[in-house]
Amino acid sequence: MPARPTARPLTALFAAGALLAGPVLTGCGGGSGGDPDTVKVAYNRNTDNKTRILDDYLAAVQKQFEHDHPGKKVRLVPIQASQADYYAKLQQMMRSPKTAPDLVREDTFLINSDIRSGYLRPLDDKLGNWPEWRHYVPGAKTAARAEDGRTYGVPDGTDTRGLWFNKELFARAGLPADWRPATWQDVLDAARTVKRRLPGVIPLNIYTGKGPGERSSMQGFEMLLYGTGKDPLYDPDAKKWVLGGQGLKDSLDFVRTVFAEKLGPDPSDAVDPNIDTRVTTQWLPSGKLAIDLDGSWLGQNWLPTGGKPWPQWARVMGQAAFPTQHGAAPGKVSMSGGWTWSIPAKSPRADLAWQLVETLQTRQNAVEWNVRDAEIAVRDDVAADPRYRTSMPGVDFFTGLVAATHYRPALPVYPRVSAAIQEAMESVTTGDTTAQQAARRYDEQVTSIAGDGGTVVRGR
C-alpha cells in the first residue's frame, strides 16, 4: 500500500468542531458503483432518533480521512433499523456489486454467517503489514476469524459481563462491601441472605427465557456454562455441537435453583422481553434489586446523558467477577460480543476501504471511540491509556475481565441453538421441567438443527 500522511487524532478534530461536518445520508443505497475515489461506509443507526454517538464519531473520522487523503471522499450510509432489520438490509446490499458498500460494520454475532455466504473479504493480506494489529488481544482476534482460519474484520471494542451489586443493600443484609464470590454457591448464599434479611428486595437477577432473547443465552446460560470447566457449547476442533454435557445440566440446574427458591424476580417478570429496562431504570436505582448479572455498559444508563440519570450510582453499585462453578482457575468467567469493521467481497475499493480502517483504528481514535461509547478496549495500548482508564467508574474492573472472556460460536446456526437454550431456560424457570428434562429436550432440538454428523455426545 502507498504511504499516507500521518493521521491526526480525533480529539483535535472534535475540539475544532469536526462534528459539524455535512449530514449523514440515509441507508437506502450506497452501492460500489460510481466514483472510484469515494469509499462508502454502511453502519447501524439507533432507531430512537436521539443517540448519535456513532454518527458523530464517523463524521469526525470522515473529515480527518478526507483531510489526510486529498481527493478521496467518504460517504456515510447509516441504516436506521432494528438490529435484526439491520442485518437483513446489510446482507441484501452486499449481494450485488451494484449495491455493496466498501466498508461495513459487522456484529461478531453474525460475522461467520456473512463469511459463509461469501459477502466478506479476508483481510489477512492487510493485517500482516499493519503494525497496530499486534495490540489486539487474542480473544478479539478470534471473534473475527472464520472457520477457514482467515480474519474478516477489525474489532473496534467489546463488552464484558459480571455481577453488579448494591452495596447499601449488602450493608443492611450484613454482606461485605468488597464482595468477591469464589463459587456459584457463594452467589446463591448471598442471594439467600438477602432474601432472609431484606423482605421485598429481589436478591438476584439472571436473564432467562425466550422473552429477553439473546440476553438469556449469552448473559445467563453461557456465563454459567463456560464457568463449569466441562464440555463447551460447541467443539471447534470436532466442528460439532456438544450434547449431553454435564455442564449443560449444571447450568440449567443453577437457573432452576434461583427461581425454585424465589431468589430471582417473579417468573412472569423474568421472561418479560422488557425486563432489562426494568432492571436498569427501576429495580437497581430504587434499591429493589440486590445482585444483577449484567454487562459492562450498565453505568451508561445512569450518567446525566443516560436514560435514567442516577448521580449516586458510582457510590452505591459495586462490581464482582462471576465465579467459575467450584472456583477452578481462572476463578472468573465473562462473555463478550462486539462489532468489527469489514470489507465486502464485492467492493472494488478494498485498498481505499482499508486505508479508512487504518484511520478509524489509530490508537488515538480507538481511545476516542471506546470512551465515547463506553466500550471495553480490545487493544492493550488502549486499555493502558489514562483517558480510557478514567472514562467511567468500573471501566478498570470490566477491562480486567477481557482476559477471562469467551465469545459465542459465531456460526450460521447459532441463532437457532440460542433459541433452544432460551426454551430450556424458560422451562426450568417456570418449574415446568427439571434440568435433566430440559437438557434432554435441548439435545433433541440441537440434533435437529445441526443435522446428521453435526453433534457429538458427551457425558452419557
Image: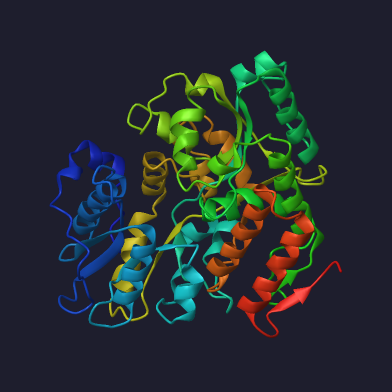
Residue occupying the point 48% across, 55% down: 338
| Residue found at the far left of this picture | 22
Which of the colour schemes (rainbow, by chain, secondary structure, one colour) is used?
A: rainbow
Q: Residue 96's image quarter?
A: bottom left
What quarter of the picture does the N terminus occupy?
A: bottom left
Q: Residue 19 placed where, x, y %?
A: 20, 44
Q: Is residue 102 visible?
A: yes
Left or right relative to 15: residue 321: right
Residue 330 percent across, percent down from the top left: 76, 46
Query: Is residue 125 shown above or below 139?
Result: below
As drawn, 282 above or below 8: above
Q: Residue at x 51, y 55 (%)?
A: 213
Is residue 9 in view? no
Front-most of 408 and 217?
217
User: Horizontal and vertical percent for residue 80?
Assistant: 26, 57
Name which quarter of the figure residue 241 lies in. bottom right
Q: Is residue 54 left or right of residue 386?
A: left
- Is 450 placed left or right of 272 in the picture? right
Label count reads 0
Q: The C terminus lies in which quarter of the figure?
A: bottom right
Residue 457 lies, with reference to residue 207, above or below; the image says: below
Question: Residue 205's quadrant in the figure?
Answer: top right
Which residue is most to the bottom?
A: 452
Q: What x and y, as percent, mark residue 295?
A: 54, 42
**Residue placed farthest to the right in the image?**
460
Residue at x-position 78% and y-position 36%: 182
- Seen in the picture, residue 242 relative to 57 is either above or below; the reply is below
